[in-house]
Image: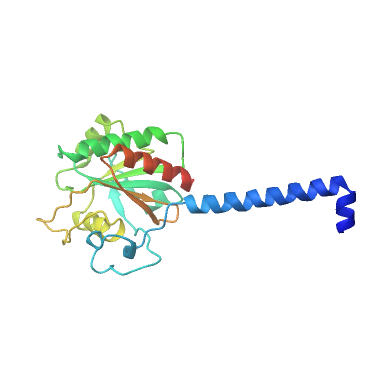
Amino acid sequence: MQTEFFKNPHLRQGIIIFLVLTSLLIFFSYWLQEEQPAVYNPSDLNPALVDSSLQGVNSDHTVGPFSLINQNADTITEMDYAGKIYVADFFFTRCLTVCPVMTNNMEKLQNEFLNDEDVKLLSISVTPEMDSVPVLYDYASKNGAIDTKWNITTGKKKHIYELARKSYFAAVDEGDGGLQDFIHTPNFVLVDKEKQIRGIYDGTKDEEIQRLIKDIRTLQ
């Protein structure tokens, strides 16, 4: 074989090309794997973000089932996001501080992935008693939300607050979802097609939005 290798230039060239291509394939496979955003479990996060019942859990966390009402009075569940990459945030329409910035950045994400059917957005009101469907419809219209891409939702407060604390880890305080309970967070949460959390970002910062866009593209 060694003699044949030196005597046959075509064989030599073919083997060299094969080895180079194999090396490149191994390199790029490793590179792509390294670039993938991590899967987040409760134990990977700041304990302040994790409900006490889940602290220490280090595997298999996924976003739980949900049932919400969007700006068109349609029921939205986890099935509407099945097989999708999506970004979730928690807001309220009367917020005059971080929420307008967050909503503006959600619109930027909508425009960035407008023609990508794999990517969706989900905004959840933390003041559902005030954010009725007509209020959400007006808010969605003012902020350019496209209902096939971006659901702006309300629902039962206890359910919403449990989602924030036990599924999305978007709140830094504990509570019971009762009358006096209140969540106010700038976090955007990236969820992959398997309902796993792949990143948490400050939705008020441009550099974080760019990092989020990059991570979404990597997951695709």
Considering only vertical position in the picture, is 139 above or below 20?
above
Q: Quadrant of the N terminus?
A: bottom right
Q: Is residue 146 visible?
A: no
Identity of the residue drawn at 36% across and 49% down? 190
Q: Is residue 41 left or right of residue 1?
A: left
Q: Is residue 53 visible?
A: yes
Q: Is residue 192 left or right of residue 145?
A: right
Identity of the residue drawn at 23% across and 34% down? 139
Identity of the residue drawn at 23% across and 46% down? 186
Q: How many marks?
A: 0
Identity of the residue drawn at 15% across and 40% down? 95
In this view of the protein, which residue sits in the foreground, 200 or 174? Answer: 200
x, y (%) of residue 80?
39, 48
Q: Is residue 40 left or right of residue 117?
A: left
Q: Is residue 140 left or right of residue 176?
A: right
Asked which quadrant contains residue 180, the reply is bottom left
Asked which quadrant contains residue 130, the reply is top left
x, y (%) of residue 62?
38, 60
x, y (%) of residue 129?
15, 48
Q: How is the image coloured?
A: rainbow
In this view of the protein, which residue sits in the foreground, 54 or 19? Answer: 19
